[in-house]
Amino acid sequence: MKKFLYSLSLGGLATLLIAAQPAIASGDKESPKDEADDSHVPKRITDRRHPDYVRCRLEPIIGSLAKKRRVCMTNSEWAAHIQEGNRRSNQFVSDMDGGLRTDVQ
Protein backbone atom coordinates (compact mmCIF):
# COMPACT_ATOMS: atom_id res chain seq x y z
CA MET A 1 0.00 0.00 0.00
CA LYS A 2 2.85 2.37 0.84
CA LYS A 3 4.49 1.69 -2.52
CA PHE A 4 1.22 2.50 -4.28
CA LEU A 5 0.85 5.85 -2.47
CA TYR A 6 4.51 6.68 -3.10
CA SER A 7 4.19 5.98 -6.83
CA LEU A 8 0.92 7.94 -6.95
CA SER A 9 2.54 10.97 -5.36
CA LEU A 10 5.54 10.76 -7.71
CA GLY A 11 3.19 10.53 -10.69
CA GLY A 12 1.30 13.61 -9.51
CA LEU A 13 4.54 15.51 -9.01
CA ALA A 14 5.75 14.55 -12.48
CA THR A 15 2.44 15.73 -13.98
CA LEU A 16 2.77 19.10 -12.27
CA LEU A 17 6.33 19.55 -13.52
CA ILE A 18 5.37 18.70 -17.09
CA ALA A 19 2.37 21.07 -16.99
CA ALA A 20 4.46 23.92 -15.55
CA GLN A 21 7.34 23.47 -18.01
CA PRO A 22 5.84 25.54 -20.93
CA ALA A 23 5.20 28.49 -18.62
CA ILE A 24 8.74 28.38 -17.30
CA ALA A 25 10.25 27.95 -20.77
CA SER A 26 8.35 30.89 -22.27
CA GLY A 27 10.11 33.28 -19.92
CA ASP A 28 6.95 35.26 -19.14
CA LYS A 29 7.85 36.23 -15.64
CA GLU A 30 5.72 38.84 -13.96
CA SER A 31 7.50 40.70 -11.26
CA PRO A 32 5.66 41.53 -8.04
CA LYS A 33 6.02 45.20 -8.95
CA ASP A 34 3.88 44.68 -12.08
CA GLU A 35 1.19 42.96 -10.06
CA ALA A 36 1.12 45.82 -7.55
CA ASP A 37 0.43 48.32 -10.35
CA ASP A 38 -2.68 46.40 -11.38
CA SER A 39 -4.30 46.64 -7.97
CA HIS A 40 -6.55 49.65 -7.56
CA VAL A 41 -6.18 51.60 -4.36
CA PRO A 42 -9.30 53.71 -3.76
CA LYS A 43 -8.73 57.41 -3.31
CA ARG A 44 -9.46 58.77 0.14
CA ILE A 45 -12.64 60.86 0.30
CA THR A 46 -12.00 64.23 1.92
CA ASP A 47 -15.30 65.97 1.15
CA ARG A 48 -17.42 65.64 4.29
CA ARG A 49 -20.64 65.99 2.30
CA HIS A 50 -19.85 63.06 -0.04
CA PRO A 51 -22.35 60.16 0.41
CA ASP A 52 -19.52 57.64 0.91
CA TYR A 53 -17.60 59.69 3.48
CA VAL A 54 -17.37 57.68 6.71
CA ARG A 55 -18.35 59.46 9.92
CA CYS A 56 -17.89 58.03 13.39
CA ARG A 57 -19.55 59.08 16.61
CA LEU A 58 -19.53 57.91 20.20
CA GLU A 59 -22.82 56.75 21.67
CA PRO A 60 -23.21 56.23 25.41
CA ILE A 61 -24.03 52.73 26.59
CA ILE A 62 -27.20 52.66 28.69
CA GLY A 63 -26.45 51.67 32.27
CA SER A 64 -22.86 52.84 32.24
CA LEU A 65 -21.50 56.26 33.11
CA ALA A 66 -18.15 55.82 31.40
CA LYS A 67 -18.54 53.34 28.57
CA LYS A 68 -19.06 54.60 25.04
CA ARG A 69 -19.59 52.72 21.80
CA ARG A 70 -18.03 53.96 18.56
CA VAL A 71 -20.42 53.76 15.58
CA CYS A 72 -19.08 54.40 12.07
CA MET A 73 -21.27 54.68 8.96
CA THR A 74 -21.20 56.51 5.64
CA ASN A 75 -23.24 59.69 5.18
CA SER A 76 -25.87 57.81 3.17
CA GLU A 77 -26.13 55.13 5.89
CA TRP A 78 -26.49 57.84 8.56
CA ALA A 79 -29.28 59.48 6.52
CA ALA A 80 -31.12 56.16 6.21
CA HIS A 81 -30.59 55.49 9.93
CA ILE A 82 -32.07 58.89 10.86
CA GLN A 83 -35.04 58.43 8.52
CA GLU A 84 -35.77 55.00 10.01
CA GLY A 85 -35.61 56.46 13.54
CA ASN A 86 -37.97 59.27 12.58
CA ARG A 87 -40.37 56.83 10.94
CA ARG A 88 -40.42 54.61 14.04
CA SER A 89 -40.95 57.50 16.43
CA ASN A 90 -43.78 58.92 14.31
CA GLN A 91 -45.39 55.47 14.18
CA PHE A 92 -45.08 55.15 17.96
CA VAL A 93 -46.70 58.54 18.55
CA SER A 94 -49.53 57.83 16.12
CA ASP A 95 -50.15 54.42 17.74
CA MET A 96 -50.30 55.96 21.22
CA ASP A 97 -52.52 58.84 20.15
CA GLY A 98 -55.99 57.95 21.40
CA GLY A 99 -57.81 60.75 19.71
CA LEU A 100 -61.60 61.02 19.64
CA ARG A 101 -63.22 57.60 19.40
CA THR A 102 -66.53 57.66 17.63
CA ASP A 103 -67.26 53.91 17.78
CA VAL A 104 -67.99 53.92 21.55
CA GLN A 105 -71.72 53.99 22.42
Image (cartoon, helix red, strand yellow):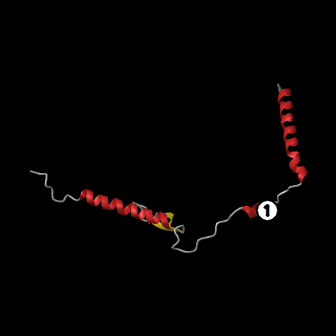
* 6 displayed left or right of 62: right
Disc 1 packing (10 Å; few <14; some 14–19; many ≥20): few
Q: Give coordinates of residue 7: x percent, y percent.
A: 86, 30
Toward the right, the furthest residue is 25
| Nearest to the observer: residue 28 or residue 76 | 28
Quadrant the N terminus occupies:
top right
Amino acid tagged 1 = Asp
* Picture residue at 18% right of the left edge, 59% below the top: 99
* 85 displayed left or right of 24: left
Toward the left, the furthest residue is 105
Q: Give coordinates of residue 41: x percent, y percent.
A: 67, 65
Q: Tell me the SS state at disc 1.
A: helix
Quarter of image, res 42 = bottom right
Toward the bottom, the furthest residue is 47
Give the residue at mark 1: 34
Toward the top, the furthest residue is 1
Q: Give coordinates of residue 53: x percent, y percent.
A: 54, 69
| Nearest to the observer: residue 56 or residue 26 | 26
Is 15 situated above or below 95?
A: above
* Picture residue at 22% right of the left edge, 59% below the top: 97
* 95 displayed left or right of 62: left
Q: Do we see residue 60 in this rendering?
A: no
* Picture residue at 77% right of the left edge, 60% below the top: 35
Quarter of image, res 66 = bottom left
| Nearest to the observer: residue 27 or residue 58 | 27
